Amino acid sequence: EDIQYLQNTAEGNAYVLHHVALRMKEGQSPGPELRTEIREAFASYLENVVLVRWDSDLLEFLMQVSVVDEFTLELAEMISGNLHVTALLEQAGEAGNFITQEDGTYRLRPVLIDALRNRALKLYGRERVKDFKYNAALYYEMHDEVVPALRLFEECGKTERIKNLLIRNARMNPGNGHYYELRRYYFNMDEREIEDSPVLMAGMSMLHSMLMDDEKSEYWYEKLKAFATNAKGGVRREALSRLAYLDIGLPHRGSRDVLEIIKNIPALLFDKGNRLPEFSVTSNLPSTMNGGKDFCHWSPDDTKLAKTVGPLVERVLGSYGKGLVKAALGESYYEKGEDNYEVMSLLTRAQVEAGQGGTMEIAFAAVGVRVRLALLQGDSPAARELLASFEQSVRENRAVQLLPNIQALRCRLALYEGDMDMVERWMKTAPDEDREFCSLERYRYLTKVRCYLANRAYTKAQALLEKLRYYAEQTDRPYIRMETGLLSAITKERVGGPWQEELAIVLKEVERYRFLRLITEEGAAVWPLFQREKKALQEAGTLNKDWLRRLLAEAEEVARRYPLYLKKRAAVAADFKGVALTIL
């Protein structure tokens, strides 16, 4: 075990191994405590023995850029003010193996960063180091990288810059902004400072709603409402547009009244010279029906709503409305198992419209359902290719906020194909629900539940499902409530608990919307439950017979196409050698 620990942590570093050997002679064992001691000792060795041998211009440059963990050429120039960065990086590459480069981003080994920071503090002093950090913060601010910019401004003590950045971030919708990551900064602001800005008040209302603190959210909503009553001119218009934005977007209010609110908005926007703030209906999820809000209750009248209020919705939402109606209609048709050609046609046109002055978020909603459709039809290679192509476009357009959910969708494809290596890699990047539960991560949490089921971690799966169920109830989200109920029934059936009643409740609600795919996509995971309950469901007569027949037939077909879905791997290729693999 000691050797294995060293192999994983020492990275072949002779200094580390020598230090460990000496400590083991004294009776110590390798572990986190000894590792920290060695890291500090090695950093000191680098600082006092290695760094002093380098050319002064190289050492000075590396000390300056060590205020950040990674950097590009442009950022390095901004921090150091040096125009010869490329030559210095070449020199650094010749001096040792402590610097790596990938896709234009350079990284120093962490222990070297420690040594460089220690030496910079001694050589430059605290105030000069703050100047380098300030330069880096300005670079991040110019490139809309709010989180590192705020951290560095805080370390420099630039409070006014922090406030300006928080206002700028609050102008963005929750999908693009960093509300959750920056909550500490928002909560640390003086209440009087927040009350001076309608943007900050709206941001606080949205943040508390995302954290499922309805009372605090409504508190800031009322503060903003009172502010708007007394304000004048452009400030009043800003406040009124923020109120309209919150009326539509606050998660805890659900989506029942959204249509009436949208109908009243044109007068506010177009007659009085106001405009709606940046708004996203997807929250970066591959869905419009189950994105920023739940619109399941619109599905029964989808075609009628698309024709009557669709143009109005697109007009109100501006760029975020381009392609929205077709994407939503295509998804609604898909969920109800309607004509595949019509579904594909609507989604493809939605993607094209979104690409013509619209947003990548709406395009992702259309692509996400197209991927599901290809998978359902048994063409998983086409689903993978479509997703890979869209990811490349996302990277080219720098819509990086979509990447986490794109990776989660790729993990779901891997689950259907039984690629547990890919699943294990994704799980290393998945959000930790035990450390903190963030409602914005709901799509990745639901992916993680499926990974838990595939790995037979049923207790973890059920614990996460209960958190998601609570979130769905608090924010009136029927789709997630039905999805968690179904996954919960699957989990309980696998551990031998009572699951029949939960499945019956889910089926009754899903049938009310005439949805199919929410159930049938679970294929091999849900089919064992249907095999046991099929006769009882047919004889009970509580579900529409035609709907139930279609549901059972499609679930069986998906189970046959993807038999490995949510099944734990029994063996890997490495377990079999040459001839055995040939025979298999």
Image (cartoon, rainbow, N blue to C red):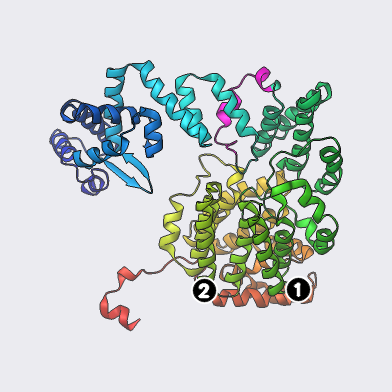
Image quadrant where residue 41 sits: top left
Tell me what residue is drawn at x 72 percent, y 51 percent.
321
Tell me what residue is drawn at x 38 percent, y 49 percent.
103
Q: Give x and y (percent) for residue 378.
A: 56, 75
Compared to residue 186, the image places residue 282 above or below, namely below
**Number of marks drawn:** 2
Tell me what residue is drawn at x 38 percent, y 39 percent.
72
- Span colored in magenta: 177-194
Q: Give x and y (percent) for residue 449.
A: 55, 55
Residue to which mark 1 is pinned: 547
The kind of secondary structure element at disc 2 is: loop
In three-dimensional space, the C-alpha distance between marks 2 and 1, rounded to whole angstroms, equals 24 Å
Q: In this view, does 15 lie to the left or right of 463?
A: left
Q: Give x and y (percent) for residue 507.
A: 72, 65
Among all residues in the image, which is located at the extreme front?
Answer: 83
> Which of 24/170 is in front?
170
Residue to which mark 2 is pinned: 563
